[in-house]
Image: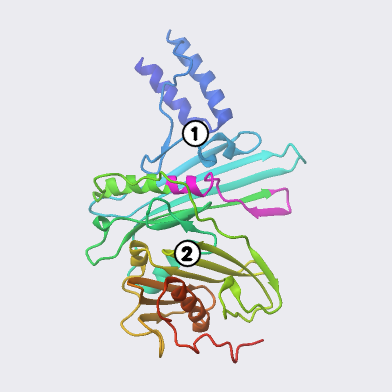
Amino acid sequence: MDEARAKAGLLRGRLPHSGRGRLLLTSAVVLVLAGTGLGTWAADTWPWPKERYCWGAWEEDSGPGFLGDEAFGEDDEGSRTSEETAPTHERPTGSCEIVIAADYTSGYDGDEVTSDERVTVEYGPLPEAAEPRFEKLRDGFLGGDVVPLPDGLPGTVNAHGGLLVLPESCDTEDGRPTVVTLRTSGVYTSGSSYTTDSPADLGGARQAAVLLVEVANRGMAAAGCAPDEPLEVTSPLLDLPGAEESFIGSEEDVCGVRGLYLGMERLEYRIGAFTRDLQTCSVRSDKDGTPYLDLAAVAQPRLAAVFDGVTGQRPVARGWRGTGSLGKEYAVVRAECAGRTVVLTANGVSTDLRHLAAFADAAAARLGCAPIAPSDASDPEGADR
């Protein structure tokens, strides 16, 4: 029996992790077991468990496309590999990356197709300095295509990933929150001339939220900071992003914000979350989709905590309420608004405070508090027209 298991394990390690690989593997194991007189078992029972990924949080064939054979393409041939480092109590940082690779001939036009898709998870405290902290947040976690996580969970999500701020029990000694991020990427190539981005299939924004919470629970357990009850996603996503809007020529009220003028001839914007806890908008160049500006107003306490320590001790400029700071590719302001703390951010190529001023005062009016920027701060006088 031990010899049969050893042979089966050796065969399994040498065959590709795909549908076709499983068929070959089943046949091989049948032959191995038959040779040892152990050629029968229950038809629906494998002699080994399914693969698990990211500290055991996700199981093979458990629902999302990237965990099933459909990720391998038309010929159901490919590989799924992973590398991971789990957080610990002594070192509360961790990472996990799943790589799905496929290489096949298209049944439609006969072209050779290759794809490389990746699902990446990072667990750990936010960087201390402002620039690397905003760099971590820049990859779509506060853009116009995100919505708040359901069930009051502090974070954001879209179909390609999300960010979750963990409970205070996971904060560092200096008070920095620990976050879990999930993101996807990928490249699809067909023939010699067609290449496009092709991120892994997470199964939609709500399924991405479930995946994010599952891996967060595993990470917290490994780091020794898990709450008494695990985090859960039980509700649907109710706040969906708006459609992309494109404009050619001057546009005075980008993102539906009165007075938000960018001075761009061609632009594309999208309004994302629009709640009392979170409001977001993204602006892109209509020519090539280059990210230009992400705007966010964050009032959810734990999500706002990701900006603790980077808003300085003084107003961002003369006449502004609260405190703030201005960097190479970000501007951030923290102020009190109707009994709550709100953090307003501009993140991207533009750090023109006039853009943040228009957005900040629109958010303040919506939340029912006094303007945060001075009355002339968003005046487009002098902007290139």
Residue 322, position in %: x, y? 35, 81
Please identify the quarter of the rendering in which residue 167 is found: bottom left
Q: Mark 1: give few (<14), some (14-19) or many (20+) Cα within 10 Å.
A: some
Compare residues 271 and 314 and report the one nearer the observer: 271
Compare residues 36 and 159 and report the one nearer the observer: 159
Residue 58, position in %: x, y? 42, 39
Q: Residue at x 60, y 92 (%)?
A: 382
Mark 1 secondary-structure assignment: loop
Judge from the rendering whether residue 338 lies leftward or rightward of residue 77; answer left or right: left
Q: Which residue is mark 1?
A: 61
Where the N terminus falls, by quadrant? top left
Labelled pair 2, 1 in contact (Cβ < 8 Å): no
Span shown in magenta: 190-211
Residue 78, visible in the rendered structure: yes
Residue 101, position in %: x, y? 56, 43
Residue 90, position in %: x, y? 23, 53
Residue closest to the far right: 109
Q: Which residue is mark 2?
A: 142
Q: Is residue 87 magenta?
A: no
Vertical arrangement, residue 39 with respect to residue 212, above or below: above
Mark 2 secondary-structure assignment: loop
User: What amino acid type should be assigned to the residue bearing mark 1?
Assistant: Asp
* Mark 2 or mark 1, whichever is nearer to me: 2
Q: Residue at x 73, y 51 (%)?
A: 192
Where the C terminus falls, by quadrant? bottom right
Residue 329, visible in the rendered structure: no
Residue closest to the far top: 37
Judge from the rendering whether residue 341 lies leftward or rightward of residue 10; answer left or right: left
Q: Is residue 193 magenta?
A: yes
